[in-house]
Image (spheres, rainbow, N blue to C red):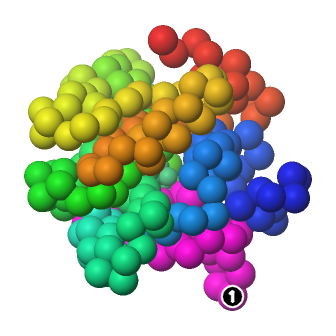
Amino acid sequence: MKKDELLAPGHRTCAGCGPAIAIRLLLRAAGKNTVICNATGCIEVTTSQYPTTSWKIPWIHVLFENAASVASGIREALDMQGKEDVNVIALGGDGGMLDIGIRAISGLWERGHNVLVITYDNEAYANTGVQRSGSTPWHASTTTTPSGPASKGKGQWKKDMPSIAAAHHIPYVATASIAQPFDLDKKIKKALSIKGPKYIHIHCPCTIGWRFDESKTIEIAKQRP
Ligand SMILES: Cc1ncc(C[n+]2csc(CCOP(=O)(O)OP(=O)(O)O)c2C)c(N)n1
Ligand SMILES: [Mg+2]
């Protein structure tokens, strides 16, 4: 572990967890002067088991529904205290951000709060047993869309969240992947340099959900254009 690493080891993500890599890269890019509002999901559950925490920065667990609402409130409170330089990030998985929490995120973007919204996209509700989400791709096999003789897997297309973000005419929208860490780093830094609402969608494979060996996370990530 690097001395200045902001996600401490000892958390309980799976070996080879794609989202854990995304969060470490995120924190390296964002730095200490950051507050994170984290919706329920694998990252929240595995990093904050009472009475421990892996977060070395201010971090709050919020419901799926209101990560963006809480982040908006924190932003406004910090600004009132003259702390405009503090980064506020609303963070969640694809289920939390694309499905359950989308209403509050849309509100945040529309109102124009100076907040970076981040989805770490493992393409399923992984924490509860790999159920399909709006972000699960066409024909992917999940526990609620199993492929087999009676079904070809999920029967709907992946929800295009970056386009939904862009349709809000916010100043910055980007897609990224843990397969391209330098690109991800640049995009986070660029987003945080812009005052206003921002969105970054980070694609990250899930070893349990996608059923690949834990040593192959980056290799699998690289296969997705
Ligand atoms: C309103 C609500 N519905 C369902 C749950 C149960 N639940 C906890 S974690 C989780 C999966 C979240 O999926 P995602 O946001 O994609 O994050 P991941 O687990 O994949 O990291 C679910 C459904 C909950 N905590 N709250
Ligand atoms: Mg997920």
Query: Residue 59: x and y, percent?
Result: 53, 73
Mark 1 residue type = Pro
- The residue at the point 27 percent across, 51 percent down is 196
Q: Is residue 66 visible?
A: no
- The residue at the point 33 percent across, 57 percent down is 115
Magenta span: chief secondary structure:
loop
Side of 91 where 152 appears, left or right: left
Outermost residue on the bottom side: it is 51
Give the extent of the magenta segment. 41-65
Q: Secondary structure at mark 1?
A: loop
Outermost residue on the front side: it is 82
Report the front residue among 132 and 165: 165
Asked if the beta carbon under badge 1 is closer than 8 A to the nearest atom of ligand 1, the reply is: no
- The residue at the point 27 percent across, 74 percent down is 76
Quarter of the rendering containing residue 19: top right
Query: Residue 77: x and y, percent?
Result: 31, 80
Q: Is residue 8 magenta?
A: no
In this rendering, the answer to whether 57 lies above or below 127 is: below
In this rendering, the answer to whether 30 lies above or below 160 is: below
Q: Quadrant of ligand 1?
A: bottom left
Q: Is residue 31 visible?
A: yes
Report the front residue among 133 and 111: 111
Quarter of the rendering containing residue 75: bottom left
In this rendering, the answer to whether 176 lies above or below 1 is: above
Report the front residue among 68 and 12: 68
Query: Residue 5: x and y, percent?
Result: 77, 57
Report the front residue among 131 and 146: 131
- The residue at the point 57 percent across, 65 percent down is 33
Q: Disc 1 marks which residue?
A: 51
